[in-house]
Amino acid sequence: MLHVIIRKIYMEIFCGMKNNLIGEYDIQAPYERSTMPNGLRVITALMPATRSISAALYIGTGSRYEEDREAGVSHYLEHMLFKGTNKRPHPKDVSEEIERVGGYINASTDKELTIYVSRVARPHLPVAIDLLSDMLLNSKFEINEIEKERQVILEEIHQINDIPSQKSFLLSDGLMWPDQAIGRDIAGTPESVRGITKTMMLDYMGKQYSPNNISLVVAGQVSHVEIEDLVHDLSEMKNSSQSRDMVAALNKTPEKRLSIEYRKTEQASICLSFPALSVMDPDRHPLDLLSAILGEGMASRLFLQLREEQGLVYDVGTSVSKLKDTGSMTIYAGTEPKNAPKAIRGIIDELSRVSNDLKESELNRARELLKGRLLLGLEDTRGISSWLGYQETLMDQIYTPEDVVKSLDSVTVEDIKRVASKLFRNDLYRLAVVGPFRSEKRFQKILENIG
């Protein structure tokens, strides 16, 4: 239920692979897809050599679909589906059901997506499907469990806020999308979580957990017909006539580009961020490669410059978040507070250089990095189910690895420079810093003197 991990998965899942340097890999992700009469999408991927099965429910809703007064309800609801059903009345009955067969079950909530996933040995596939279906259809929402989980979620929020690096990302999102749901913490605020009621959760679930907004993805030694037979209960769900539409992101020049939060810490946590691209933008793959060149891996520019050459940081890297209609790119660094201004200037200098000076060898390195990650990610049933589920739910179509490979291989050095020039504009920089700083002046000066 760690809602923050989904971002990293989301960043990496659409990277493709085809190795130009050491021969070609034949990567196939064959799948079958059908739509049940009520709109539920069923997708299966046959993996004959595996002994595990991954079954996941992808629901097209998340924190950006919430109203201000119910901020965090998507995440709260995700927690409550583990707290007992009519058939399995206690939380331990849910966990024991899957653990007694050596399986795994978990869930995550993000801005646009909620996922429930189970992984079991092949003979226990019916257990996994039955449990996921039961949780979705028959969770009890008992008041005492709601209240206990409220405190658990408040502690989760406190934990995230107590970790400076994670807090810097939350501040960065607030700068990127101020005064809108997409810029809030996925878990909500302590105030909003205290105000969420059973009625609010059931109302939200009734609208958003509609079968035409759900995909069931199963990967492993399975046949499509077998899965269709096992989803009888889900196939009888009724559609909601009140599903909420996603509120479009407001991408405008921010009134505030700097957010500093004082913490008496030994290290400053820095997030330098920019508006980026949506999940369907034609330049999404040049963006992925740009991110890899700058800050993914120990051979990336930022790592070599700020850590190896200058010794300013222990941790530095880039991340990309691609959503349905918007996106962001963030550079994170952790450094000794007295070195924070120098580290920020060093990052900005490197971003400026990449727009003008980029070698073909760097692009090839980045390509192979992303390709290798895909190879590793598609080795198991969980990786395949993620590949299919994310695309089906967020993109309404499924690209094969070869499709993505073709796009990656067509990216040129000039494409990378063009995207970098579009992103790294002086007026688009946002800066969030958590550390022992009482004043914004030194950081404001850096932003004012970019370029």
Image: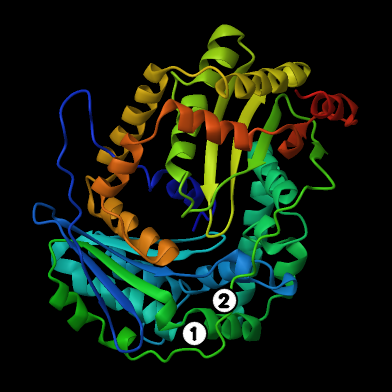
Q: Position of 107 compared to 192: left or right?
A: left
First along the sequence among labels 2 and 1:
1
Q: Position of 436 compared to 378: left or right?
A: right
Q: How crowded is mark 2: few (under 14 residues within 10 Å), some or many (20 or more)?
A: some
Do the numbered discs 2 and 1 sit on residues whose CB atoms are within 8 Å?
yes
Q: Position of 33 compared to 335: left or right?
A: left
Q: Which mark is residue 145?
A: 2
Q: Which mark is residue 296?
A: none
Picture coordinates of residue 45, whole percent (x, y):
19, 62
In this picture, is 383 found above or below 334?
Answer: below
Picture coordinates of residue 337, whole percent (x, y):
76, 21
In this picture, is 351 found above or below 409?
Answer: above
**Residue 222 visible:** yes
Q: Residue at x 42, y 92 (%)?
A: 238
Amino acid type, residue under disc 1 in the picture:
Lys
Q: Which of 283 and 58 is in front in this view?
A: 283
Picture coordinates of residue 302, whole percent (x, y):
55, 20
Q: Nearer the viewer, residue 288 or 80?
A: 288
Residue wearing tag 1: 140
